[in-house]
Each structure stands twice: as C-alpha cells, then as structure tokens.
Image (cartoon, coloured by chain):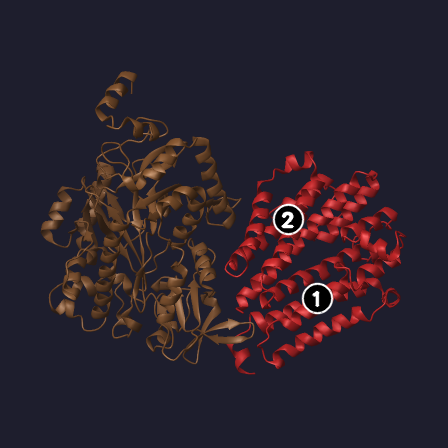
Chain colours: A red, B brown
Amino acid sequence: MLSRVADSLYWMARYAERAEHGARLLRVRLEAMVEQGDIESSEGWRRMLYALADLDPDDPAADPRDITYRVAFERTNQSSVISSIAAARDNARAVRELISSEMWEQINRQYLRLTNLDFDFVWSSNPAQTFIDIGDGIWFFQGITHSTMRHGEGFDFIELGTYIERAQLIARLLDVYLSPPQDDGPKFATPGYFDWISLLKQCTGFEAYAKVYTAQIAWRKIADFLIFDPEFPHSIRFAVDKVQSALEQIAPGAPQSRRAAIARMAGRMKASVDFGSIDEVVQGGIAPFLTSIQKQCEAIHTAVYTTYISYGLEDVLER
Amino acid sequence: MSTDERALDQELDEPPEQEAAGRFARPGLDEPFDAYVLDHTFDECFLPNRWSRPHYAPLHELLSSLPVEEIQRRQLACEQSFLHQGITFTVYGDSKATEKIIPTDLLPRIITGAEWDAVERGLKQRIKALNLFLKDIYHDARVVKDGIIPGDLVFGAKHFRNEMVGVEVPLGAYVSVCGTDLIRNEAGEFVVLEDNLRVPSGVSYMLANREVVRRAFPSVFRQSRVRPVEAYPQMLLETLRSLAPAGRENPRIVLLTPGVFNSAYYEHTFLARQMGIELVEGRDLLVHDGFVCMRTTSGLERVDVIYRRIDDDFADPLVFRKDSVLGVPGMFEAYTKGKVVVANAFGNGVADDKAVYAYVPRLIKYYLGEDAILQNVETYLCREPSALNHVLANLDKLVVKAVGESGGYGMLVGPHASEAERAAFGEKVKADPDNYIAQPTISLSRAPCFIEGKFEARHIDLRPFILTGAETQVVPGGLTRVALRRGSLVVNSSQGGGSKDTWVLAD
C-alpha cells in the first residue's frame, strides 16, 4: 500500500483514539465532581490536566470550566478533543478513497457536530452527557471501521495507530496515579478510594476489574489489572500485544531484512508485559517501567516511519 | 400585478383545455410558479404559451401539487447528504474553517432522447477532429501548411508545448477525457461555447446530483425513463486501460491529484474509489530506472497509466515549472519514451484556446470532410483588423475574452460592465489584439430552479463528458451548471454558480 496512505490511516486512528480518551477522562471527571468536595475535586482536575496535556496542572487561573474548555474545545491546544477529531478527519479525508463511506461520514458528522456546539450551552446544561456522546461517536467510528473496512494492511496500520496511542495514554495516566512524586514534576495528594474508582472508570475498567478482583479496591491489584490483564482492552498488555500483531502483518512484501529490527523491538516490549509481574515492577519502580513503555512505543513509531513510510530511494536500493 | 391585470393576462393566455390548467401551475401566474418570468431566452421547461413542454410534464405536474414545505424538506435532505459526504469547498480566511457545499438545485434539467442523440453525434465528431488536429500539429502540421489555420496562432499559443513535438501518443488519444461546454441559443439549438481538453472536472457532481435527485423524485424519475450515468467510472477505467503500454497485462493505473487542498479533491477521491485505483500525489511517485514508480510500504511498484488531474505546468519540474512541488521529476521523459502513459496528454491546451476554437468547424471539415453537427458561437478574432474594429465599436454588446484563460477569468461582459470598465478593457484589447476574441452576448437558456420557496428561471449550460481510448464514448447528459444569481450568465462554480442533475430520456 502507498506509504502516504499508511501514514494517514495510522494518524487517523491515533487521533481518534486520543479524542476518545480525552472525552472519556472529561466525562468521568465531570461526573465525579458532582459528588466530591472542593479539595478532592481540584486534585482530580489537576491529575486529569497532567495526564491529558502538557498543561501546567498548578495554573491558579484554571477552574473546572476553564480546564474543560481548554482540554476539549480549544483549537489552539493541539491535543484538545476538538483538535484531535479535526486531525483524525483531515487524515480520513486524505484517504477518502480508501476508507469506507460509512467511516468517513461518521467521523465527518462527529466533527461537524462538535464544531456546532456552543460551549456556554454545553457547560450550563449537561456537560458530562456531551462527552458521553462524543466518546460514543468515536466508538461508533471505530466499530464502523471494524465492520466495513477490509481487514488488510490498511486496517493493520489503523490497529497499530490505535494501540500505540492507547498504550502511551494509559501508561501516562497510570503514571499520574501510581508513581511517587518526582523532584521536577508536579505533586499530587495520595489517591483515595474515590480516586481509584475514578481511575478504573477512566480506563472503562471498573466493571471488568470487579469481575476479576470483586469490588475490592487495592492499588496493587488495580495496577496489576491495568498493566497486565491479557484480556482487558484498555490494559497496557492488551495494547502492546495488538501493536506487536499489527506489526507482523504490515508491509508483507518488504524483505525480511527490513522488517527484522522492528519485529525485535515489538517482541521485546511484548515480552516485558507478557512475562512481567506487578511485584517485579513495584520492586524496580513503577515510574521507570511506565516511562520505558512510552519510550519503546516512540521508538517503534520512529522505526516504522524510517522503514515503511518516509524511506528514500537509496534505502530500497542498498538492500 | 393587480387582480384586473392578472385576469386580463389570464384571458390572453388561457390554455384551451380547462382541465389541464387546474393540474398545472402556469409560470408567472399560479403559485408556486408565480415568480417565474418567461422572456426572450429559450426556456427548457415552458413553451411561450406557458404550457410545459411534454418531456417536462410529469415533473411540472408534481411541482404544481407538492406543498412548498415538502420541496424545501427534500432540498434540505439533499444539502445534508452533500455535507455529510464532504462534497464541500473550504471558505478561506475563516478561523472556524467553515465548509460550504457546492450549491445544488433539486430540480432536474431534462433533455429528450432525440435531441441528445444529435448532440452525442456532434460531440464525437468534434473530439475526433480535435484529436487529429493535436496529432497533426505535434507532427507534420499539415493543417498549417495547407493554410487552414495560421501557424503563429498555433505555435504561438500560450499552451503549445514544444516538448510534445514528435512524441507518440497511444491510439492518438490526446484528449482521453473531455468536457465540452454547450449552451442553448434563443432558437433552442445546442451550440459549443468552449472545449476543455486539459483537466476537465465536474463529473463527480454529475454523479452526486443524480444520487440525491433520484431519491428526491423517485416516481417522476421512473416515469420519465432516464438514461443511467452511473457507468461513468467503469467507462473511464476501460478508457485508461486501453491506453496502457503494450505487454502490460495487468496495468497499474493511478489517479494523480495535486492533493487535499485542491478544490476538486473530492472528485479525485470519488473517482479513485469508484474505479478502485490508487489515488496518488506527486510525492508518492518517483522515477527509477526510467520507470515511474510509487512508494509503498513494501517498496517501489511500477505505474503504467497516470490519470493526472494536475496541470501541465505542475506535472514535472524538470520540464515545466521548476518551482512545482506537486509534480514528479522525470515523469515527462518516462512518458516520451513510452514507459508510462499520462492522460490527458501534455500540450492539449493549444486546442481549447479561444482563438483556435473559432477554427474548429473548419478543422472538422478538413480532417473528416464533414460539416460540423454542433455549431460554434459566432466569434470575432481580434487579430483580424476588421473584426477588431467591430469589437471596439460594439463593446457594449459583446463578451470579450482573453484566449488561453478559463473559469470566467480575464473576460468582459459588455452589457453588464460600466462605461469605465469597458474603456479600460478596450485599451487592453488594443494593446494586445492577438490575445482576445469576442462573441455576441449569448443567451443561455433557462430552467426552473427552487429558490427561497419559489420556482424561478435561471440561466444554465451543459458540460457533457466525452471519453476516448480504443473508442469514443459519451455519458448521457453531463453536468448542468446554473447561474444561481438572478439574471447572471456566469455559471462557473468559482463565481457563484451551482449545478443540477441532467436527465436524458430514453426516447
């Protein structure tokens, strides 16, 4: 498949995943806010802001309304929900001939709906419901993708984009809750019962967790579940496994010599979650582990680009 | 109009059969056609006596009886469908990056089968002569030696490409995809306004319009027995396949687009998807070992036929514009060596030049020994002194156009221009007469459009699409363009025009 097309499909999927993640965190936060006191709530907003964007969580001017606007609707914020959906749609438009019409119309409809929303109205009516709708719209898009597009190489690039993004986003979110404060990073209060529930909900994992561990809330079990559960779609292990299998499928015609380095990187990352345990991770430090997952994802991303997407003529000829 | 006047008017125009008058709303009289004014131009739908033409009767009857709200609802559904499909253009300079749909009018424009058959014969004849003309001027130029057309007019034309001299074009099909603009004059005859032989666009709107209009008027559509246009993408694919280099059993065909910012990008994606071919940009292609290849995730793959939707100027920076980043360096050389086929051929612009246009009837006679079936609009070549004097003396009555421009740019519509504008344009013509032609203000025919809750008459033209590979095929109908502003004659989408579905009836 055309390298440029692979590039667009990959980013379309990444941005869609990013938008859905943002909408989901906002939804959980807005729902939790109603039940929390001011201090707990403000801690929740700070955590979310740090998990979602490179925005300063200690900006004194930031109140929930302001944060929601910045994280969801501000176009100048590259990682806002609206920017992500716009970017997903731009990429979809660039491969309009390759994706199904149903996919395009769904992402286009989501984008048009979002641009027509009036933020004052959203905030004064039912903001949580708005983000439920946005998130559902993207799940719908991802579902349509599964159901209407050929599961060929293009689809594998979509899977790759979705799960690389997810692995990184979840790793970053866990980092905010689980890692001890760093000297140069922001300081968060120790999470309480309510925060752990929020974390599970932010990973769509409360019910799934309860089925494995009952509703017993213990941070070690939560960490184990969200990092190592092989069957839960928002665990790091699940995402890493999907990344690895997508990489096995793409560029089937490329010579083995070009594929080997990437296969090695993916295999190494997969082994670290397939054969790791929460005890080892706690012992070696949760923060370095989560950072390493994010770094490995970045390295795979770079390798995919230099190998399959933006290679030069000389790269092909010398092999 | 007062009640008395209306009564008088009715008396004069009362159709003989009372029964029919009850079912059909008469233009200029009955709602919702009361704002529909008939004038001296040819009306596609109505006869001068306010009766609808027979082939419009089923539609007219329906429109007379449907509540306006229902038509509005269908128009809205059609606009929504365009918006969701992304058949839009971006309004620049707007921070929200607003996207607008290409204006489309719900009411089909209808042509009888017999009329169409004559048009189709005329188009095939014309395109055949133009292909022979292009082959001739890029080889022996017999047509110039025989004194049919002045050499300076051909070789000095803005779009004549020296690089094309002696290049062999597969099947002699220089113009594989042609969009010829036709208008209907006051007598109701179709005449040719201009040929588009380079990178004509609009065919996706023809197909998109058909989809929504068929949905809006299913019963009239069935009853009218409309010839289908849906086969266009397959016809185009067949055409491109027939041009592939010899010995390439399963040729790889691609559509080359300037990219997502081009105003016709929707059309490029649409056609690529419908044909099942790869949509590529210049940066996807490179020339390796003399062949054009595309960069895929698995490595380089050879390309055999390029349906290019970018202008000559931008196609290859090594030969044409050096600053082009949209093209493929080395593509032209691969093309001249027959390693890749590019459609349309390069250098076609010389034959759709507005000055060469005036000679087309003579070219048809010269190459085919036949009289032109489709006439030209009367044209004055300002390069001829007597014509120049006539043009300068009659600027208020004429439309003056720069040759080698398209899209409604560089032109003066005399009757609609101010004294000062005419004077200024006259100076430009005097300074460079070779660069201008003039035509009488042509009267485009008019057809009903749905405008703000009423039916009104608007000027229209017609762009049929003609494909030439191993054979020449014309899709029945084409794109009807509408000048949506009242009284306007400019149908170009870049200048406030819209479009309509075009129905060619089975018989």
**Mark number for residue A242?**
1
Residue B190: x percent and y percent?
23, 48
Chain where mark 1 sits: A
Which residue is depicted at the point 22% across and 50% down? Answer: B191
Which amino acid type corresponds to the residue marked 2 in the rendered image?
A: Gly
- Looking at the image, residue A172 sits to the left or right of residue A303; the answer is right
Image vertical order of residue A155 relative to residue B421, above or below: below
Characterize the local packing of mark 1: few (<14), some (14-19) or many (20 or more) Cα atoms within 10 angstroms: many
Q: Nearer the viewer, residue B488 or B6?
A: B6
Q: Where, by quadrant of the figure, is residue A15 drawn?
A: bottom right
Q: Earlier in the sequence, mark 2 or mark 1?
A: 2
- Looking at the image, residue A124 sits to the left or right of residue B273; the answer is right
Which residue is depicted at the point 31% across and 40% down? Answer: B56
- Looking at the image, residue B312 sits to the left or right of residue B411; the answer is right
Chain where mark 2 sits: A
Q: Nearer the viewer, residue B278 or B397?
A: B278
Query: Looking at the image, can residue B323 be seen?
Result: no
Residue B225: x percent and y percent?
35, 48
Q: CA distance from mark 2 to mark 1?
A: 23 Å
Dot 2: element: helix
Dot 1: element: helix
**Mark number for residue A137?**
2
